[in-house]
Amino acid sequence: MLSEYDMKIFQIKRSVRMNCKLVFSLAVVLLVGSSASWAADDGGALYKAKCAGCHGAKGEGKPAMKAPALKGTQLEVNQVVEHITKGESASKAPHNRGIAGLNDGQAKAIAEYVKTLK
Ligand code: HEC
């Protein structure tokens, strides 16, 4: 027979274990949730934040910024990605180098969004 003391210890241990499980599953949910939102970079939102200031909200270009229209661009997605992640020394700023703070996934999401502009 278990003594009352043993029962108490048993109950405490069990509730600690259940709490650990709860914390662990919560952490998993949070991790999975956040990596999912990373996977689906929002090209439209990134474009607005990083490109629209010069190229216009609809990719119409801004003469005042000397930024050409991007809608209907002949460039392929991977060329746009190159243009914004690496840049070319022959291009004018800001494209004489890569745009800061863009990872590959974000650059691709932006490039794909640019291709949807008509
Ligand atoms: C500070 C203003 C500015 C910002 C911000 C900017 N651009 Fe540009 N962009 C330019 C200018 C100016 C040019 C033309 C000069 C060049 O690239 O030779 C250009 C050219 C381009 C071209 C080449 C177009 C062509 O037909 O040759 C692409 C593609 C492009 N930008 C995409 C982007 C994207 C995508 C972003 C956001 C990540 C972005 N740009 C942010 C100013 C900007």
Image: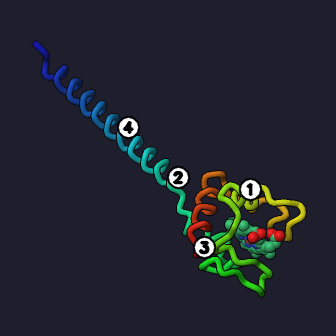
Callout 2 amino acid? Trp
Residue drawn where x is 54% and y is 57% of the image: 41
Residue 38, which numbered label? 2
Q: Earlier in the sequence, mark 3 or mark 1?
A: 3
Helix, strand or loop status at disc 2: helix
Q: Quadrant of residue 31?
A: top left
Q: Nearer the viewer, mark 1 or mark 4?
A: 1
The answer as to whether callout 1 falls within 8 Å of ligand 1 is no
The answer as to whether callout 3 falls within 8 Å of ligand 1 is no
Callout 1 amino acid? Glu
Q: Earlier in the sequence, mark 2 or mark 3?
A: 2
Marks 1 and 4, Cα distance to the nearest angstrom?
40 Å
Q: Nearer the viewer, mark 2 or mark 1?
A: 1
Callout 4 amino acid? Phe
Q: Position of residue 97 (x, y in %)?
A: 82, 60
Determine the residue located farthest toward the right in the rendered image. 90
Residue 24, which numbered label? 4
Q: Quadrant of residue 29?
A: top left
Determine the residue located farthest toward the front in the rendered image. 74
Relative side of 2 to 76, left or right: left
Q: Earlier in the sequence, mark 4 or mark 2?
A: 4
Q: Earlier in the sequence, mark 2 or mark 1?
A: 2
Q: Position of residue 6 (x, y in %)?
A: 19, 20
Marks 2 and 3, Cα distance to the nearest angstrom?
18 Å
Residue drawn where x is 24% and y is 29% of the image: 14
Q: Nearer the viewer, mark 3 or mark 1?
A: 1
Front position in the image: 112 or 46: 112
Q: Which residue is mark 3?
A: 48
Residue 82, which numbered label? 1
Marks 3 and 4, Cα distance to the nearest angstrom?
37 Å
